[in-house]
Image (tube, grey):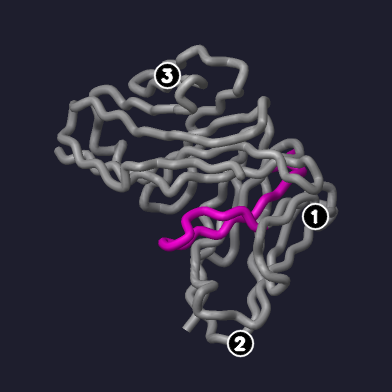
């Protein structure tokens, strides 16, 4: 069974630009969550999608958005990039919604560098 | 607010030593879930264990064992006879309830970097 895949793996952008990251969950998983990992703030929850609807949202500005498609693939978008957005963006999928009981399977991440 | 503390930033041991990674959590929930993840240099988080708040039984999986104590709000992770391949960053995480939707998201600790020297 293929794991969670994320594309691209590495990305370099400049301030003010926008970026779209993609995540394909494990087959049969309907929930996709996004996390941001930085040296200073650690791992922080961005949002979760389930059945094409955003179900949870972390404490991030509106520049961070996402969506989920009918095949459960998800994209996240960051507009007007800032230097502080440089991070490893991790996507995780689980069979059901929420992290209450189901373990989340993580992808390898997309490392975004903002210059 | 829910919180996870991993006080050990970095631990270095020599191969075959036992090592314990500490995790202390805070939550007002009576039902919650605790997790441990391993993050090797490749960056992908690897699930190790999930434990719910009603099950305080310790668990052993090969060289890995976990000690969950609600009385001290701790969920510690021990690696017995460590190996070089155990070198990674280990994260403890708590599944919390979100106030507005009642849904749950993972709150991670800051991680402990384990270096196992040959």
Q: Quadrant of residue A79?
A: bottom right
Instruction: Give the numbered dot on residue B61.
Output: 3
Magenta stretch: dominant SS? strand
- Give the class, few, some or many, for how many residues have Cα within 10 Å of label 2's Cα (few <14, many ≥20): some
Q: Residue at x 45, y 27 (%)?
A: B75
Can you give x and y, in whole percent of width and height, for residue B22 in the image? 37, 33
Please state which of residues A43 and B8 is positioned toward the viewer in this rendering.
B8
Precedes in sequence: disc 2 or disc 1:
2
Which quadrant of the rendered structure holds the N terminus of chain A? top right
Identify the residue under disc 2: A16
Can you give x and y, in whole percent of width and height, for residue B36 in the image? 48, 34
Q: Chain of mark 1?
A: A
- Give the class, few, some or many, for how many residues have Cα within 10 Å of label 3's Cα (few <14, many ≥20): few
Q: Chain of mark 2?
A: A
Looking at the image, which residue sits at the far top?
B57
Q: Secondary structure at mark 1?
A: strand
Please state which of residues A8 and B118 is positioned toward the viewer in this rendering.
B118
> In the image, is B41 to the left or to the right of A37?
left
Please state which of residues B104 and A28 is positioned toward the viewer in this rendering.
B104
Q: Is residue B26 above or below residue A74?
A: above
- Give the class, few, some or many, for how many residues have Cα within 10 Å of label 1's Cα (few <14, many ≥20): some
Residue A37 magenta-highlighted: yes
Q: Are marks 3 and 2 on the same chain?
A: no
Q: Chain of mark 3?
A: B
Can you give x and y, in whole percent of width and height, for residue B4 in the image? 49, 41
Magenta extent: A27-46
């Amino acid at each position: 069974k293929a794991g969670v895949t994320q594309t691209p793996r590495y990305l370099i952008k400049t301030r003010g630009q926008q970026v779209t990251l993609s995540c394909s969950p494990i087959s049969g998983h309907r929930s996709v969550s996004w996390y941001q990992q930085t040296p200073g703030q650690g791992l922080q929850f961005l949002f979760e999608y389930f059945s094409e609807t955003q179900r949870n949202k972390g404490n991030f500005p509106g520049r961070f958005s996402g969506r989920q498609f009918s095949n459960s693939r998800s994209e996240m978008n960051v507009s007007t990039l800032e230097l502080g957005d440089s991070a490893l963006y991790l996507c995780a999928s689980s069979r059901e919604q929420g992290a209450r009981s189901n373990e989340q399977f993580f992808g390898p991440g997309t490392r975004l560098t903002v210059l | 607010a829910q919180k996870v503390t991993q006080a050990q930033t970095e631990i270095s041991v020599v191969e075959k030593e036992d090592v314990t990674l500490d995790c202390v959590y805070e939550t007002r929930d009576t039902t919650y879930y605790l997790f441990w993840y391993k993050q090797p240099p490749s960056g992908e988080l690897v699930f190790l264990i999930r434990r719910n708040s009603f099950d305080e039984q310790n668990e052993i999986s090969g060289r890995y064992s976990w000690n969950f104590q609600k009385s001290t709000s701790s969920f510690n992770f021990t690696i017995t006879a460590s190996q070089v391949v155990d070198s990674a960053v280990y994260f403890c995480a708590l599944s919390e309830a979100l106030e507005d939707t009642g849904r749950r998201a993972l709150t991670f600790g800051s991680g402990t970097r384990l270096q196992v020297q040959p």
